[in-house]
Amino acid sequence: MFILIVGAGRVGSAVARRALESGHTVSVLDSDPLSHERLDKDQTTTWEDAGGRFTVSTALEIDGLIEAGIEKADVFMAATSGDNTNLVISQIAQRRFDVPRIVVRVADPARAAWYAEQGLITICPTQKAIDMAEQVVLAD
Amino acid sequence: MYVIIVGAGKVGWNLSRELIVRDQEVTLIESDHRRYRIVEEELEHVVQYGDATEMWVLERAGIQRADLVIAVTGDDEDNILICQVAKEKYGCKRIVARVNNPRNLDHFKLLGIQPAVSATDLILRLIEHEVPEYGLVQLLALEEEQLEIIEIEVGEGSEAAGSMVRDVPLPDGSLIISVLRDGAGFVPKADSSIRAGDQVLLILNPGLEDEITPRFAPSEVESSA
C-alpha cells in the first residue's frame, strides 16, 4: 500500500516508521524540515535509505500534497497538531483526490464524532484518554 | 436577523458595529482573551469569548437560530470549518467566509463554502475596473445561481459599435443590462444604439465570456485573433 502521512509529530512519525517496517510505501509531509529527525531517531539507517519519502510543505498546499504522492495514495492520514488543518486536508484528500481510506486525528471529541458521521475515520486521543481514565477512576 | 460573526479582528469588529447600527442582532465570538477584553469594553455582552470551531461555543452563541454566520478569522482552516459546521450540522442557510490566502480559495469551493470573500481578489477587481485595457471586468459572480455580471468596453470598429442593442449577436443566456457613457449610466432598450468607448454591462451564464468578448473587441484585434 502507498501510505501518505501529513504531520511528522509523535503519532505521525511512529505510524510512518511502523508502516515502512511492515513493507509499505510511506511518504511523510511536514512543514517543519526538522521534524525529519523524528523519523531517523534510534534507527540504524536514515529514513530515506530505509525507503521512506519526506516532503517539506504546508499541509494546505496542493502542489506539496501532489509532490508527496497524494494522487497514488491508498491511505491518507492527517496527523498534524491542528484539528482544523487535519479536518480540512482530509476532506481535500476525500473529495479532490478520492483517496480510498482516510484517517484523521481530531483532539476535540465533539467534532471527532460528527465528522465520523460524515464518512471520515476519526481518531480522538482525548476520547481515548477519557474512556481509559473513566475505567481506572471508577474501578472498584 | 440574527448574525453570528467569528473573529473580532478589524473586519469582525467593524462588521459588528455596522450591523448593530442597522438594528440587527449580533453575537461576535473571539478566541484570543486579550483581544476579547478590548472589544468587550465597547461591545459588552455582544462579544463572547471562545473558540468557535468547537461546537459548544457555537451552540452557546445560539447557532440553532442564526440566520447568518460570518467567519472572518485570520485562519482559513478555521473559517472553512466554522462555516461547514454551521451549514451542514446546524442547517444555517446563509454563510460568508473570509479567505486570507487567495491560494486557498479552491479549498473553500471544494467544501461548498460560498460566498468566500478574498480581500486580494476584491482589490484586484477594483484595479481591473480602473484600468480599462483589461477589456473585460467581472463585477459580480453568483456562483450558486450560475449568473455573473461583467463590464466590457466597446472597441473602435467592433461589431457592437454603432449597432442597436437588438442587433448585437449575443449567445443565449446573455443580456445587455446597462450602458455607461460619459460618466452616466442608462438601461438600454432594444433600439438603443451602442457606441465605441461605451462600457456595457451584461448579465450571463458563466462560460459565455469567450463568445461575447469578440463582439466588443476592436476590429484589428479581432482580425489578428
Image (spheres, coloured by chain):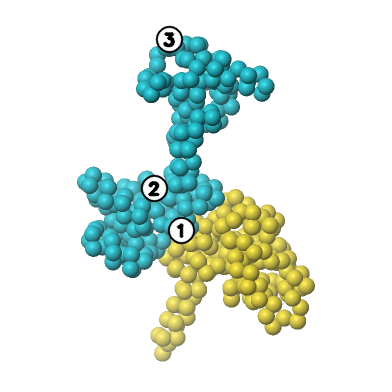
Residue at x 60%, y 17% (from the top left corner): B219
Which mark is drawn over residue B205?
none
Position of the C terminus of chain B by quadrant: top right
Give the image location of residue A25, x and y in percent.
73, 65
- Which residue is identified by label 1? B75
Between residues B60 and B211, which one lies in front from this camera angle? B211
Q: Which residue is mark 3?
A: B191
**Element type at mark 3:** loop
Give me the chain letter of mark 3: B
Alpha-carbon span between mark 2 and mark 3: 41 Å
Q: Are marks 2 and 1 in contact (CB under 8 Å)?
A: no
Q: Residue at x 36, y 57 (%)?
A: B9
**Marks 2 and 3 on same chain:** yes
Q: Which label's residue is closer to the chain start, 2 or 1?
A: 1
Using the image, name the chain to which the residue with label 1 belongs: B
Q: Residue at x 57, y 21 (%)?
A: B217
Q: Are marks 2 and 3 in contact (CB under 8 Å)?
A: no
Chain A, which colour?
yellow
Q: Residues within 10 Å of mark 1 (few under 14, many from 20)?
A: some
Packing grade of label 3 (10 A; few <14, some 14-19, many >=20) is few
Instruction: From the viewer's perspective, tell me whether residue A39 is left or right of residue B178.
Output: right
Horizontal and vertical percent position of residue B221: 62, 22
For badge 1, the amino acid type reads Asp
Task: Tell me the SS state at disc 2.
Answer: strand
Relative to residue B42, is residue A128 drawn left or right?
A: right
Distance, label 1 to label 3, CA atoms, is: 51 Å
Q: Which mark is residue B95?
A: 2
Which chain: cyan? B
Give the camera-side residue of A7 and A21: A7
